[in-house]
Amino acid sequence: MKTHFNSLNHLTLIPSITVIVSLTLSLSVNSSCQVPANSKDKELVLPAGFKAEVVTESVGQGRHIVINTNGDIYVSLQRLKNKGGVVALRDTNKDGKADIIKYFGEFSGTGIGIHNGYLYVGADTIVVRYKLRPGELLPDTKYEVIAKGFLKNNQHGSKSFTFDNNGNLYVNVGAPSNACQTPDRTFHTAGTDPCPLLQQFAGIWKFSADKLNQHQMIEGQRYASGLRNCVALRWNPATDKLYALQHGRDQLHEFWPENYTEDDGVNLPAEEFFQINDGADCGWPYCYYDDHQNKKLLAPEYGGNGKTEGRCADKVKPLMGFPAHYAPNDLLFYTGTQFPQTYKNGAFIAFHGSWNRAPQEQKGYNVVFVPFKENKPAGTWDVFADGFAGVPAIKSPRDAKYRPCGLAQGPDGSLYIVEDNKGKIWKISYSK
Amino acid sequence: MLKIIITALAIIPVFISCTQFHESTDNVNISTELTNYQQKTPSKTTKPDEGKSVYMKFCLSCHQKDASGVPGMYPSLQKNKVVTGDKKKIINIVINGLQGEIEVNGEVYNQTMPPQNYLTNKQIAEVLSFLRQNFENKADSVKVKEVNIIRK
C-alpha cells in the first residue's frame, strides 16, 4: 500500500519536474548560449584545465583589485558605496567565496595597490595610503596623502598606478580630451598645436612611493608623455621595466569622413601596448597607431589623412596593437607557478569593451593573454577569459552583463578578475 | 525513459531561445535596426525620417543605435524625462552641449557632450522630434520656429 502511494506520487510529479527543468534551462541559456569549459561558474569561458569560481556577486562598481599575502582582497570602487570607496573581502572558511565584506575609506576611484605594508588608493585627484594592520581586514582609518594636485577631469580621470622595485610610484594622468581639439570632439576642428594639455595631463607621472604630500607639478616627474589614457599600467618585475596600454582616440570617421570610412572609424586606431622608458613620447594627440600599416600616423586634427607619418615617424611604437576601442583597463604580469609554464611572466590584459564601434557590433569585453619572452611578447595574443557580456553579439554597451576592469594575482597563483557593472569577482585557478 | 522525456522537453525551450538570439543578432542595417525601436504611429507633425538620419549621422556614435547610451559616460535617451520635458532645455543642450556629472533615471553619467551648433534649426527640430516620439518616449514634436526663438 505504501509502495503504491509512493509510485503514484512520483508519477504526478513528472510533469512539474519537466516544466521546472525546462524553465530553468530556458532562463539560464537565454542569458548566454555559450558552453563553459570545465568551469564552476556558468558564465565564463576559459581554456581547458582552468576553472572560474565566484568570489562575490555584486560589491559595487569594482575597478582595480589587489590581494594581500594572507589572501585578503581590496577593490577600488568607481563611486562610494555604503560610505566606502574601497571594499575589503575575506574568505574565512577557505571555500573560495568571500564571507566578510566591508566598505571603508573616503576616496573612491580606480587605483589600488599594496606597498610596504600600506594600502594605496588612487582617487581621480589624489593618491592616498592607509596603514594595513597585521591580521586585520580593515586598515587604519587615518590616511596619508602621497600625491596630489591632479586637476579634475571629466573624462579619462582614473588615477591607476603601479610601483617599481625601487620605491617609486607611477601614476596614469589621462587627457581630458579626445584629440586636443577646442572644443573637444567636434567635426573638422583642428587640434591645438602645441597641445597645452601635455603639460599636466596625457602622461605617466613618477613619485616617491613613501614621501608624503607630493604635488604633481612640483615633486612629481613627468616620466612619459603623449599617452591619452593608460588605465592599464604595470611594472614588470621580471624585466624591471614599465609597461602600459593606451586607450586610443575615438571618432576618426565621425569628424573626418572624407579620409576615414565607417569601417576605418570602427577598426582604427589600434589600442597600443607599450614598454615605456623614462622620457618616452608616445605621440598623443598628434599621432595614432595604424596596426594594418604598422605605422604611427599623423592625426587628422594635425593635418593627417590616413597615410601621412609626418612628425610621428620618431614617436615610440607599441610592442603590439590590439583591436580599436577595446579599452584596456588592467595589465598583470603572471609570476605564479600554479598556471602552466607558458603563462610565466606573460601578460594578462583586461579589456573593458568598446562603445566607439557603433553602428557596428561592440567588442572586446574579455581578458586576453600575451606570452612573453624576456622583454617582449613572444607570439600573438589570445582571448583567455570570455563570456563576460553574456550575449553573443553586443549591439550597445548596455547589453553587456559584465565589463572586465581589474586583475590581480593571489598568493596561491590564482588570477582574480573584477568587473565594474555590478562588481562581480572571479577567481581563476588551474589544475591538470 | 523518464530521463529521456525530461531531457527532450528541456531541450525545446533551449533551442527556441538560442534560435531567437541568432535571429536578433544578424547583421541588419542601421536603418532597419532603428525602425525596430520606433513606435509605429509617428505624429503627423513630425518627419521621422529626417530626424532619424540626423540621429544616425551625428548622435549615434555616443548615444548608440538603440539610444541606450554608454553606462557611466553618455546617458540613455530611452524613456528619458529630459527628452520629453521642457523643449527650451533640450534645444539648448543640443546647441550648447553639456558638461559635468548628471543623473538620469538613477544612473550617473560624466562625459562632455560637445555643442552641436553646426546643425541647422531644421535639423535640431527634426532630431528632437524623432527622439521625443521614439525609444519609448511620448511627447509632442519640436517645431523649427521653437528652435528659431532660442537661436535667433
Image (spheres, rainbow, N blue to C red):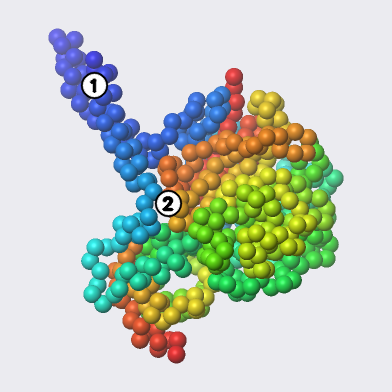
**What amino acid type should be assigned to the residue bearing mark 1?**
Ile
Which residue is rendered at x = 49% and y = 27% of the image?
A: A37
Verify CB contact (< 8 Å) between mark 2 and mark 1.
no
The chain containing the residue under callout 1 comes to B
- Residue A147 sits in which quadrant? bottom right
Comparing labels 2 and 1, the label whose residue is closer to the camera: 2
Quadrant placement of the N terminus of chain A:
top left
Q: Determine whether A141 is above or below A250 in the image.
A: above
**What amino acid type should be assigned to the residue bearing mark 2?**
Lys
* Residue A386 appears left or right of A21: right
Name the residue beneath numbered marker 1: B5
Name the residue beneath numbered marker 2: A395
The picture places residue A190, in percent across and down from the top left corner, at 64, 73
Which residue is rendered at x = 24% and y = 15% of the image?
A: B1
Q: Is mark 2 on a helix, strand or loop?
A: loop
Which residue is rendered at x = 45% and y = 57% of the image?
A: A359
Q: Determine whether A203 is above or below A199 in the image.
A: above
